[in-house]
Image (spheres, rainbow, N blue to C red):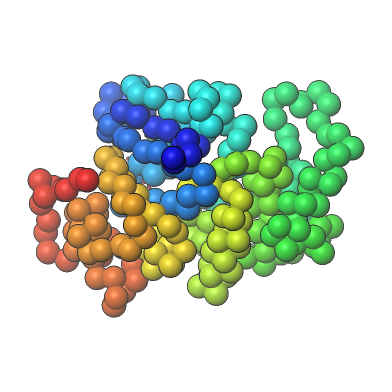
Amino acid sequence: MQNKPVIHIQNLWAGYGKDPILENIQLDIYPQDFVGLIGPNGGGKTTLIKVILGLLAPARGTVEIMGLPVEQGRRFVGYVPQFVEFDRAFPISVYEVVRMGLLNKRRLLNPFKPEDHQKIMDALEQVNLAGLAQQPIGELSGGQRQRAYIARALVSQPEILLLDEPTASVDSHTSTTVFELLRELNRRVTILLISHDISAISSYVKTIGCLNRRLAYHAQKQITADMLQSTYQCPVDLIAHGLPHRVLPSHNQEELIHD
Ligand SMILES: Nc1ncnc2c1ncn2[C@@H]1O[C@H](COP(=O)(O)OP(=O)(O)OP(=O)(O)O)[C@@H](O)[C@H]1O
Protein backbone atom coordinates (compact mmCIF):
# COMPACT_ATOMS: atom_id res chain seq x y z
CA MET A 1 0.00 0.00 0.00
CA GLN A 2 1.28 3.47 -0.87
CA ASN A 3 2.15 5.92 1.92
CA LYS A 4 -0.11 8.83 2.63
CA PRO A 5 0.80 12.01 0.73
CA VAL A 6 2.89 14.58 2.58
CA ILE A 7 1.27 17.26 0.41
CA HIS A 8 -2.31 16.75 -0.74
CA ILE A 9 -3.85 19.32 -3.06
CA GLN A 10 -7.35 18.88 -4.42
CA ASN A 11 -9.41 21.15 -6.68
CA LEU A 12 -7.24 24.14 -5.78
CA TRP A 13 -8.06 27.55 -7.24
CA ALA A 14 -6.06 30.58 -6.13
CA GLY A 15 -5.07 34.06 -7.30
CA TYR A 16 -4.63 37.65 -6.20
CA GLY A 17 -7.80 39.24 -7.51
CA LYS A 18 -10.78 38.18 -9.53
CA ASP A 19 -8.82 36.17 -12.08
CA PRO A 20 -7.44 32.84 -10.93
CA ILE A 21 -3.72 32.16 -11.34
CA LEU A 22 -4.04 28.52 -10.31
CA GLU A 23 -6.92 26.61 -11.85
CA ASN A 24 -8.19 23.35 -10.47
CA ILE A 25 -4.84 21.96 -9.31
CA GLN A 26 -4.65 18.32 -8.21
CA LEU A 27 -1.36 17.14 -6.74
CA ASP A 28 -0.30 14.46 -4.30
CA ILE A 29 3.35 14.39 -3.23
CA TYR A 30 4.53 11.31 -1.34
CA PRO A 31 7.40 10.75 1.12
CA GLN A 32 10.81 10.83 -0.59
CA ASP A 33 9.37 12.24 -3.81
CA PHE A 34 11.63 14.70 -5.64
CA VAL A 35 9.33 16.79 -7.81
CA GLY A 36 10.58 19.33 -10.33
CA LEU A 37 8.07 22.05 -11.16
CA ILE A 38 8.57 23.76 -14.51
CA GLY A 39 6.50 26.24 -16.46
CA PRO A 40 6.63 29.62 -18.19
CA ASN A 41 7.17 32.93 -16.38
CA GLY A 42 3.96 33.92 -14.65
CA GLY A 43 2.59 30.37 -14.88
CA GLY A 44 1.93 30.30 -11.12
CA LYS A 45 4.84 28.26 -9.69
CA THR A 46 5.67 30.72 -6.91
CA THR A 47 1.96 31.21 -6.27
CA LEU A 48 1.59 27.47 -5.67
CA ILE A 49 4.50 27.60 -3.20
CA LYS A 50 2.83 30.55 -1.41
CA VAL A 51 -0.34 28.51 -1.01
CA ILE A 52 1.60 25.55 0.38
CA LEU A 53 3.37 27.88 2.84
CA GLY A 54 0.07 29.40 3.94
CA LEU A 55 1.01 32.85 2.61
CA LEU A 56 -1.89 32.90 0.18
CA ALA A 57 -5.33 31.48 0.98
CA PRO A 58 -6.97 29.33 -1.68
CA ALA A 59 -10.11 30.70 -3.31
CA ARG A 60 -11.37 27.12 -3.47
CA GLY A 61 -10.12 23.63 -2.79
CA THR A 62 -8.13 21.67 -0.23
CA VAL A 63 -4.46 21.83 0.72
CA GLU A 64 -3.11 19.52 3.42
CA ILE A 65 0.43 19.02 4.66
CA MET A 66 1.18 15.81 6.55
CA GLY A 67 -2.60 15.30 6.73
CA LEU A 68 -3.10 18.66 8.46
CA PRO A 69 -4.48 22.04 7.34
CA VAL A 70 -1.72 24.34 6.10
CA GLU A 71 -1.65 26.47 9.29
CA GLN A 72 -0.62 23.41 11.31
CA GLY A 73 1.16 21.45 8.62
CA ARG A 74 3.51 24.19 7.47
CA ARG A 75 5.81 23.60 10.43
CA PHE A 76 6.92 20.47 8.55
CA VAL A 77 8.03 22.56 5.56
CA GLY A 78 11.45 24.16 5.02
CA TYR A 79 11.60 26.88 2.37
CA VAL A 80 14.48 28.22 0.29
CA PRO A 81 13.30 31.44 -1.42
CA GLN A 82 14.18 32.51 -4.95
CA PHE A 83 16.46 35.48 -4.27
CA VAL A 84 17.96 36.42 -0.97
CA GLU A 85 18.98 40.04 -1.33
CA PHE A 86 21.25 41.37 1.37
CA ASP A 87 24.00 43.84 2.05
CA ARG A 88 27.21 41.87 1.68
CA ALA A 89 28.90 44.08 4.26
CA PHE A 90 26.24 43.31 6.88
CA PRO A 91 28.13 41.55 9.68
CA ILE A 92 26.18 38.33 10.07
CA SER A 93 27.78 34.90 10.21
CA VAL A 94 26.73 31.72 8.43
CA TYR A 95 25.81 30.33 11.88
CA GLU A 96 23.46 33.28 12.54
CA VAL A 97 21.83 32.96 9.12
CA VAL A 98 21.06 29.29 9.80
CA ARG A 99 19.82 30.10 13.31
CA MET A 100 17.18 32.41 11.77
CA GLY A 101 15.48 29.25 10.50
CA LEU A 102 14.50 28.53 14.10
CA LEU A 103 12.67 31.80 14.60
CA ASN A 104 8.93 31.60 14.49
CA LYS A 105 6.00 33.36 16.12
CA ARG A 106 6.02 30.97 19.05
CA ARG A 107 9.61 31.86 19.85
CA LEU A 108 9.57 35.64 19.60
CA LEU A 109 9.88 36.20 23.34
CA ASN A 110 12.35 33.45 24.08
CA PRO A 111 13.97 32.88 20.73
CA PHE A 112 16.73 30.35 21.26
CA LYS A 113 17.21 27.28 23.44
CA PRO A 114 20.46 25.56 24.43
CA GLU A 115 19.75 22.54 22.20
CA ASP A 116 19.45 24.81 19.17
CA HIS A 117 23.24 24.90 18.80
CA GLN A 118 23.30 21.20 17.93
CA LYS A 119 20.46 21.63 15.42
CA ILE A 120 22.34 24.48 13.72
CA MET A 121 25.57 22.49 13.54
CA ASP A 122 23.67 19.42 12.24
CA ALA A 123 22.10 21.52 9.48
CA LEU A 124 25.51 22.96 8.56
CA GLU A 125 27.02 19.45 8.51
CA GLN A 126 24.31 18.31 6.10
CA VAL A 127 25.35 20.97 3.59
CA ASN A 128 29.09 20.60 4.30
CA LEU A 129 29.46 24.08 5.74
CA ALA A 130 30.24 23.33 9.39
CA GLY A 131 33.81 24.56 8.89
CA LEU A 132 32.55 27.98 7.77
CA ALA A 133 30.03 28.52 10.59
CA GLN A 134 31.68 31.71 11.86
CA GLN A 135 32.44 33.13 8.41
CA PRO A 136 30.53 36.31 7.44
CA ILE A 137 27.83 35.24 4.97
CA GLY A 138 28.92 38.02 2.59
CA GLU A 139 32.32 36.36 2.15
CA LEU A 140 30.92 33.08 0.85
CA SER A 141 30.82 32.08 -2.81
CA GLY A 142 27.42 31.93 -4.53
CA GLY A 143 27.24 28.15 -4.13
CA GLN A 144 28.27 28.22 -0.47
CA ARG A 145 25.70 30.91 0.20
CA GLN A 146 23.00 28.85 -1.45
CA ARG A 147 24.01 25.90 0.75
CA ALA A 148 23.77 28.17 3.82
CA TYR A 149 20.20 29.06 2.85
CA ILE A 150 19.39 25.38 2.38
CA ALA A 151 20.80 24.79 5.91
CA ARG A 152 18.55 27.59 7.20
CA ALA A 153 15.57 25.71 5.73
CA LEU A 154 16.80 22.38 7.18
CA VAL A 155 17.44 23.59 10.73
CA SER A 156 13.80 23.22 11.75
CA GLN A 157 14.13 19.54 10.72
CA PRO A 158 11.40 19.66 8.05
CA GLU A 159 9.84 16.66 6.31
CA ILE A 160 9.45 18.65 3.09
CA LEU A 161 11.83 21.07 1.41
CA LEU A 162 10.47 23.67 -1.05
CA LEU A 163 12.99 25.46 -3.23
CA ASP A 164 12.23 28.31 -5.61
CA GLU A 165 14.90 28.33 -8.34
CA PRO A 166 17.84 27.50 -6.09
CA THR A 167 20.29 27.59 -9.00
CA ALA A 168 19.00 30.71 -10.78
CA SER A 169 22.01 32.88 -9.96
CA VAL A 170 24.88 30.37 -9.92
CA ASP A 171 27.13 28.93 -12.63
CA SER A 172 26.64 25.44 -14.05
CA HIS A 173 29.33 23.80 -11.88
CA THR A 174 27.78 25.27 -8.72
CA SER A 175 24.34 24.29 -9.96
CA THR A 176 25.52 20.67 -10.23
CA THR A 177 26.87 20.82 -6.66
CA VAL A 178 23.54 22.13 -5.38
CA PHE A 179 21.61 19.41 -7.23
CA GLU A 180 24.00 16.71 -5.91
CA LEU A 181 23.35 18.02 -2.40
CA LEU A 182 19.59 17.92 -2.96
CA ARG A 183 19.85 14.35 -4.23
CA GLU A 184 21.65 13.44 -1.00
CA LEU A 185 19.08 15.27 1.16
CA ASN A 186 16.27 13.53 -0.70
CA ARG A 187 17.22 10.28 1.08
CA ARG A 188 15.30 11.62 4.07
CA VAL A 189 13.42 14.74 2.92
CA THR A 190 10.71 15.12 0.30
CA ILE A 191 11.59 17.83 -2.20
CA LEU A 192 9.51 20.13 -4.38
CA LEU A 193 11.70 22.30 -6.54
CA ILE A 194 10.93 25.08 -9.01
CA SER A 195 13.50 25.42 -11.73
CA HIS A 196 13.92 26.78 -15.22
CA ASP A 197 17.03 24.64 -15.59
CA ILE A 198 15.27 21.88 -17.48
CA SER A 199 18.34 19.89 -18.41
CA ALA A 200 19.56 19.84 -14.78
CA ILE A 201 16.24 18.93 -13.24
CA SER A 202 15.63 16.13 -15.70
CA SER A 203 18.85 14.53 -14.40
CA TYR A 204 18.02 14.83 -10.73
CA VAL A 205 14.28 14.87 -10.03
CA LYS A 206 12.08 11.78 -9.91
CA THR A 207 8.89 13.34 -11.34
CA ILE A 208 7.93 16.49 -13.21
CA GLY A 209 5.02 18.89 -12.87
CA CYS A 210 4.35 21.34 -15.70
CA LEU A 211 2.43 24.36 -14.42
CA ASN A 212 0.82 26.97 -16.60
CA ARG A 213 -2.16 27.93 -14.46
CA ARG A 214 -3.26 24.32 -14.75
CA LEU A 215 -0.95 21.52 -13.72
CA ALA A 216 0.06 18.51 -15.75
CA TYR A 217 1.82 16.12 -13.39
CA HIS A 218 3.92 13.40 -14.94
CA ALA A 219 4.95 10.34 -12.97
CA GLN A 220 8.24 10.27 -14.84
CA LYS A 221 11.39 12.33 -14.94
CA GLN A 222 11.88 12.44 -18.69
CA ILE A 223 10.85 15.77 -20.11
CA THR A 224 9.50 15.35 -23.60
CA ALA A 225 9.06 17.97 -26.29
CA ASP A 226 5.29 17.39 -26.08
CA MET A 227 5.29 18.15 -22.35
CA LEU A 228 7.18 21.37 -22.93
CA GLN A 229 5.09 22.38 -25.86
CA SER A 230 1.82 21.83 -24.04
CA THR A 231 3.03 23.74 -20.97
CA TYR A 232 5.00 26.54 -22.55
CA GLN A 233 2.67 26.61 -25.54
CA CYS A 234 5.57 26.99 -27.87
CA PRO A 235 8.14 24.70 -29.40
CA VAL A 236 11.28 24.53 -27.32
CA ASP A 237 14.64 23.73 -28.79
CA LEU A 238 16.14 21.89 -25.85
CA ILE A 239 19.23 20.37 -27.30
CA ALA A 240 20.67 23.41 -29.00
CA HIS A 241 19.82 25.93 -26.34
CA GLY A 242 19.08 24.19 -23.06
CA LEU A 243 16.68 26.98 -22.23
CA PRO A 244 12.93 26.83 -21.97
CA HIS A 245 10.65 29.29 -23.62
CA ARG A 246 12.46 29.79 -26.88
CA VAL A 247 9.53 30.80 -29.01
CA LEU A 248 9.65 29.65 -32.60
CA PRO A 249 6.52 29.93 -34.75
CA SER A 250 3.37 31.41 -33.28
CA HIS A 251 1.42 28.98 -31.16
CA ASN A 252 -2.12 28.14 -30.35
CA GLN A 253 -3.42 28.30 -26.79
CA GLU A 254 -6.21 25.88 -27.69
CA GLU A 255 -3.61 23.16 -28.18
CA LEU A 256 -2.76 23.11 -24.48
CA ILE A 257 -2.98 19.49 -23.43
CA HIS A 258 -3.40 18.26 -19.91
CA ASP A 259 -3.08 14.82 -18.37
N1 LIG B 1 1.32 39.71 -5.00
C1 LIG B 1 0.77 39.66 -6.21
N2 LIG B 1 -0.28 40.43 -6.54
C2 LIG B 1 -0.86 40.36 -7.77
N3 LIG B 1 -0.43 39.54 -8.76
C3 LIG B 1 0.63 38.76 -8.48
C4 LIG B 1 1.29 38.77 -7.21
N4 LIG B 1 2.30 37.86 -7.24
C5 LIG B 1 2.28 37.33 -8.48
N5 LIG B 1 1.27 37.85 -9.22
C6 LIG B 1 0.93 37.49 -10.60
O1 LIG B 1 0.58 36.11 -10.61
C7 LIG B 1 1.06 35.47 -11.79
C8 LIG B 1 1.86 34.25 -11.42
O2 LIG B 1 3.06 34.66 -10.75
P1 LIG B 1 4.09 33.62 -10.14
O3 LIG B 1 5.14 34.44 -9.45
O4 LIG B 1 3.36 32.60 -9.34
O5 LIG B 1 4.65 32.93 -11.45
P2 LIG B 1 5.92 31.99 -11.64
O6 LIG B 1 5.44 30.81 -12.44
O7 LIG B 1 6.56 31.71 -10.34
O8 LIG B 1 6.83 32.92 -12.56
P3 LIG B 1 8.45 33.04 -12.69
O9 LIG B 1 8.89 31.81 -13.41
O10 LIG B 1 8.61 34.28 -13.52
O11 LIG B 1 9.02 33.18 -11.31
C9 LIG B 1 1.83 36.54 -12.57
O12 LIG B 1 0.98 37.05 -13.56
C10 LIG B 1 2.13 37.59 -11.53
O13 LIG B 1 2.20 38.87 -12.11
Which residue, as the protein is rendered here, is positioned at the far bottom? 240
x then y, percent, for residue 165:
48, 54
Where, by quadrant of the figure, is residue 78 drawn? top right
Above-or-below relation of 73 to 139: above
Figure quarter occupied by ligand 1:
top left
Quadrant location of the C terminus?
top left
- State the count of labels: 0
Left or right of 243? Residue 69 is right
Give the quadrant of the N terminus.
top left
Q: Nearer the viewer, residue 254 or 84?
A: 254
- Residue 185 image offset from top left, x and y in percent: 61, 56
Q: Nearer the viewer, residue 73 or 30?
A: 30
As drawn, the residue found furthest toward the front would be 1
**Residue 41 in the image: above or below residue 17:** below
The residue that appears at 69% across and 25% down in the rendered structure is 105
Write the residue at 59% across / 48% down.
189
Residue 178 visible in this rendered orientation of the protein: no
For the point 70% across and 30% down, which residue is it?
A: 104
> Does residue 93 appear to the left or right of 36 in the view shown?
right
75 or 184, nearer to the observer: 184
Whether residue 107 is visible here, answered yes or no, is yes
Up/down of 32 relative to 25, above or below = below
Residue at 84% from the left image edge and 47% from the top image edge: 118
Return the x and y of residue 137 as percentages of the image width and height: 74, 57
Between residues 31 and 239, which one lies in front from this camera angle? 31
